Amino acid sequence: MSRSHPAILEIDHLKKYYPIQKGFLRRTVGHVKAVDDIRLTIHEGETFGLVGESGCGKSTLGRCLIRAVEPSSGQVAFTDRSGERLNVLSLDNKKLKKLRQEMQMVFQDPFSSLNPRMTVFNIVAEPLVCNGIARGAELVRRVTDLVERVGLERSHLNRYPHAFSGGQRQRIGIARALATNPRFIVCDEAVSALDVSVQAQIINLLQDLQRSLGLSYLFISHDLSVIEHISHRVGVMYVGKMAEIGETEALFAKPLHPYTEALLLSKPAADPAKRKERYVLSGEVANPASPPSGCAFHPRCPYATERCKTDTPALVEVEPDRYSACHYAGELQLQGKRQS
Amino acid sequence: MSRSYETSSQWRLMWRKFKKHRLALIALPLLLLLYLTAVFCGFLAPNLPETRFVDYKNSPPQKLRFVDEEGKFHLRPFVYGYKMEIDKESFRRTFTADTARKYPVHLFVKGDSYKLLGFIKSDVHLFGVKDGNPLFLMGTDKLGRDLFSRILYGSRISLSFGMAGVALTLVFGVIIGGISGYFGGWVDTVIQRLIDLLISIPTIPLWMALAAALPRTWSTAQLYLGMIVIFSLIDWTGLARVVRGKLLSLREEDFTMAARLSGASHARIIFRHLLPSFYSYLIVTTTMAIPTTILGETALSFLGLGIQAPAVSWGVLLKDAQTLQTLAHQPWLLWPAAFIVLTVLLFNFLGDGLRDAADPYK
Ligand SMILES: Nc1ncnc2c1ncn2[C@@H]1O[C@H](COP(=O)(O)OP(=O)(O)OP(=O)(O)O)[C@@H](O)[C@H]1O
Ligand code: SF4
Ligand SMILES: [Mg+2]
């Protein structure tokens, strides 16, 4: 999938630092390095899975790409339908609006992502109306198409979101994201709030849409099995940085970063009430406001050496199409997914 | 789940939930009735508020009767006249019912002329007795003025004050809170500190100080407006806080971001996404604030710092009931308090119902 397909999104040195402000005068006393120097390419028609513990910056990264939050620095290049390579971070508002017709987002919370005071029709029609794409009978036709495409019915159009289940709401959100005919969609925990059986339906829908429309996804999830199922390639994030990138199968079978190994060997938290902490890993997640020196993972890494405390490992291609940010990536014999 | 539930809008859902709240459902028409009474007080009151019946000072309420002293039933209600006696020792005049004199109560009686709604001249009263005989359903005060009529007239100031005060509070609160929440940054910080400062001053002394500063030479209308400004200047803080908090949290809601990503303009986001999520909330907050404002006016007028006689408000009327002595001999002077309590209770019931209904999606 990787080299054979042209890139749709090339991310380079992308950073997002949130200032930490204190006191009456709001002095900046430090920064949360939510996204810290990310390099990544996503290809056309590909699903890139992004996984990592809570707070490691997955959402921030996804949002930076469509400038839902403004990145602090870096480069994002998007290849649009006509083949033109756009510098996303330097677009003015008008061009950004145009870009967002091609880049869209599906949100995690099926409740807060739909305005409860609007009908399904108005929700799905909004991007078409705001971008001046369709009106009148044409608008009705397009919205109806979209709604049916995601598996809802024409008769649902006049209903309000409160009348739908979580899975159906997520379908509405997908229909809205599809309205402007995008080529790239950020799915931020798009199935995490749903029951397992409903998750499967939505994942199937996303995969069907990908096949028929040639979509590319950045699929963010904390759920390793979902990521394994849907992704062509996977990125593992730790405290704002990419720890490892690789093809799904290879990465799950033979990780090249100790953090990936730790994630794969961890069990999902048994207590469903503690869904925020989904993995049982030893040690505390590092604080992105003051990440540990050297390799940020070193306080929790069983293979850490003195060198890890001072030298920050760079993300390097260890094997063809396998990137890892560990000094000992090639040498360690790491364990893959537990056979179940 | 019925089809109508699925396609019903916010307002219809709210109404459905509201209807489940019995007390609120009763309070709503009663409050409407009270406000209608205030609007049509000239027609509903049998007497004018300032007319002095010098022969009937401090007379107790008359009972509206259907059965006379002989046990005979009358379809048309009537009242007895007064018999005055003077206590030899205290020289206090006391009135008792004079069963020899019966005054039937008629509908649409001609009496003193008044202006309905301030401009329609009329002398027809909904009910009354003929030939200028006394009809004091709630007694009279020390100048012989009909308390019932005065309460009806007083409701104009007292009830409208709640509405007007809260309306102005709403304007201040929404604008300042909106600025604070929308722009954020140092503007937000300054406004929040100002609010902290205002909140730290105890309200009642502040009201009193400001009300006392209003020139005594002002007309009733000027005093009324002045007091409204005082109230909203003090009251907006709470609302502004709420509006700011709501805006901040709504800005974080995914549907706001979805709208932004859909290409919606700022104006569209504010008017189609943010504000509609607010209406229900503002209505509830406002309803809850009205009784407080009514009580505030009453308190200040009662203390002589607010509306001044000869203008009538419930607070002004209660001023007559300030001493224990008057309370002992003329307990009916407390009737205005009953109206105040009733109004405040009704508003609280209504507010409770609205609060339950405000978020129909929960
Ligand atoms: N608006 C903000 N202001 C300040 N800090 C923020 C802001 N948004 C996110 N952060 C911080 O940035 C870091 C990354 O947050 P982010 O939401 O991207 O994590 P995540 O990987 O998506 O986590 P989760 O799995 O919980 O969704 C966190 O430490 C978070 O506290
Ligand atoms: S660099 Fe060192 S601390 Fe970091 S993952 Fe590799 S071995 Fe562990
Ligand atoms: Mg997230």
Image: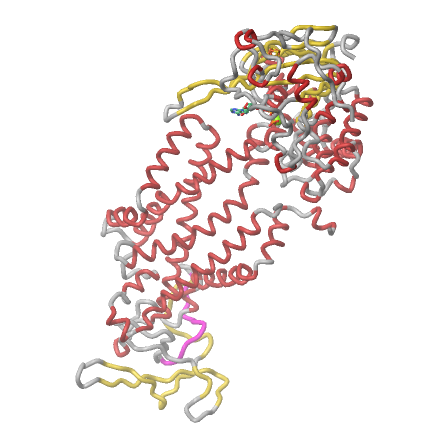
Which image quadrant is residue B40 in?
Answer: bottom left
Expressed as whole percent of the image width and height from the top left, the position of residue B185 reads 43, 26
Q: Give the left or right position of residue A74, taking residue A205 as reference.
A: left
Q: Quadrant of ligand 2?
A: top right
Q: Residue at x 23, y 81 (%)?
A: B93
Residue B312 in view here: yes
Residue B98 falls in image quadrant:
bottom left
Quadrant position of residue B154: bottom left
Front residue of A139 and A15: A15
* Location of residue A76 in the rendering, given as x and y in whole percent from the top left corner: 63, 12
Q: In this orientation, which residue lies closer to the viewer: A15 or B256?
A: A15
Asked whether B125 falls inside the magenta stretch, the response is yes
Q: Is residue A86 visible?
A: no
**Residue found at x 46% / y 28%:** B183
Residue B338, position as x, y percentages in the image: 39, 66
Total marks in image:
0
Side (left or right) of A292 relative to B330: right
Q: Is residue B162 above or below residue B55?
A: above
Q: Main secondary structure of the magenta part?
A: strand
Observer-nearest residue: A232 or A179?
A232
Taking the view exactly as shown, the residue that stands out farthest to the bottom is B70
- Judging from the image, the colouring scheme is secondary structure
Q: Is residue A103 above or below residue B55?
A: above
Relative to B223, is B280 on the left or the right?
right
Q: Which residues are magenta?
A: B120-131
